Amino acid sequence: MTDDLTEKLRTFLARDDAIGLLRRAIGRESITGNEANFVDLLGDEMSARAITNLHRADFLPGRPNIWGERKGKGGGKRLLFIGHTDTVHVDGWREHWAGTEREDPFAGAIVDDAIWGRGAGDLKGGICSALAALSLLDAAGIALRGDVAFAFVGDEESGEEGTGVSAGIKAYTDRIEAGDVARPDFAVYVEPTQLSIYTAQIGFFIADITITGRSAYFGVPERGKDALKASHAVMSALWAHSDEISARASHDLIGNGFLLITGLTGGGFIAVPETCRLSLIRKLLPGESLDDAARQMEAVIHGAILDPEIGVEISYPAGRDHPLGGSAAEIETSLPEVDLLSRCVSGAMAGRGRLEGAPFWSETPFLVNRLGIQAVYCAPGDIRNCHTFQEHVDIDEYLAGIVAFATFMARYCGVAE
């Protein structure tokens, strides 16, 4: 959709202001648990953009969400841009980049036509694209008929002790469900997609499995119950189960389901190992039940252990929108708003706006599955460099995202006379 509106917006884009916004955002360290440091900045930036009905409320003590809206002139649809404020840690970043301009993970260094730093892609680039898009409409003198809402929530990332259970979006969707926050007609969650539109995403659960036998001196192993040997049988059965899962079905956008064993610990003494611990992650496709998938896995585990004196305990430490994990989600690729967003993105940057599936789990299931709100992922940034020392966003892609989001706001919400 390279049309007169897109071209007009491109001419009004304040490149330096947009880059400065993202660099300021990166500069506010917001590793999970410290979301308030970034939310303070967001409050200022949202107020400066005449975003009203601005609310800030803790989802956990000292850890706030922030949300607000730009009210339209009336008669248009309501659009929500939403994303998480927290990032993963920066352990090892300074050592990795010591003596270079990338050394400070919060400096927003500009290197090779890209903005570098923790959170650049995941997902401050998306948040800043949405806010800068509103500024771009103002600069171009374009008023909207519908409302544009913004919600920035914490606790999405895992990895910090006692955090990462989507407490922020749970609190926000509770407010929508209760009627305290207006329900959007469509939502864009600004996870990094390189400006593709993700209409489907995987589901998952993580399982920690403890297998307990009985230790015995190595010289008389017949007196023990070998937990490591039992673990070998369990792993073999789980790998076969993964092959069976993968063969069941394939999704056009996110591929096949599977089960991946991610860790094994046990033994350590010169004796029959008494305890072994396994960790695994299960990828689910849309339509698969987390409860059914867990029951099937548990049956495989118990079926592989033939000795009744070998004990098994299974826990699920990563509940999100479901007590066991995160559910898969998808919306129809044929929806007119999906097509419109795709055309707005491709008009802003050639070759982008493709319809794809998310190889990660994030928080649209709270909107799609819980509330029945149509939602996609779309934003600048490459998920493959996020959570790494290579995290960055290409400047051209970031600026194109601003133009694309502004065009979509105008086309979806309608332009007021």
Image (cartoon, helix red, strand yellow):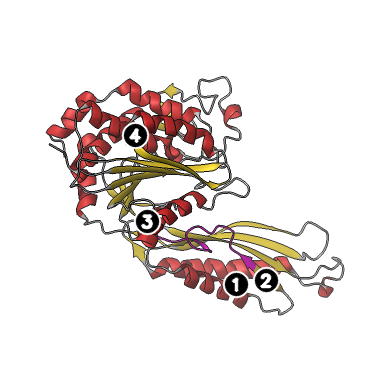
Estimate the spatial distance between the alpha carbons at disc 1 and disc 4, rounded to whole Å.
Answer: 49 Å
- Which residue occupies 66% across, 67% down? 231
Estimate the spatial distance between the alpha carbons at disc 2 and disc 3, rounded to whole Å.
Answer: 44 Å
Identify the mark nearer the N-term, 3 or 4.
4
Estimate the spatial distance between the alpha carbons at disc 2 and disc 1, rounded to whole Å.
Answer: 8 Å
Q: Is residue 324 magenta?
A: yes
For label 4, the SS is: helix
- Which residue occupies 21% across, 28% down? 10
Q: Which residues are magenta?
A: 314-328
Identify the mark nearer the N-term, 2 or 1.
1
- Would you name the residue on which mark 1 appears? 301
Mark 4 nearby-residue class (10 Å; few <14, some 14–19, many ≥20):
many
Estimate the spatial distance between the alpha carbons at disc 3 and disc 4, rounded to whole Å.
Answer: 25 Å
Mark seen at residue 312: 2
The amino acid type of the residue labelled 3 equals Gly
Residue 205 in percent (x, y) is at 52, 61
- Would you name the residue on which mark 3 appears? 179
Give the label, 2 or 1, closer to the camera. Answer: 2
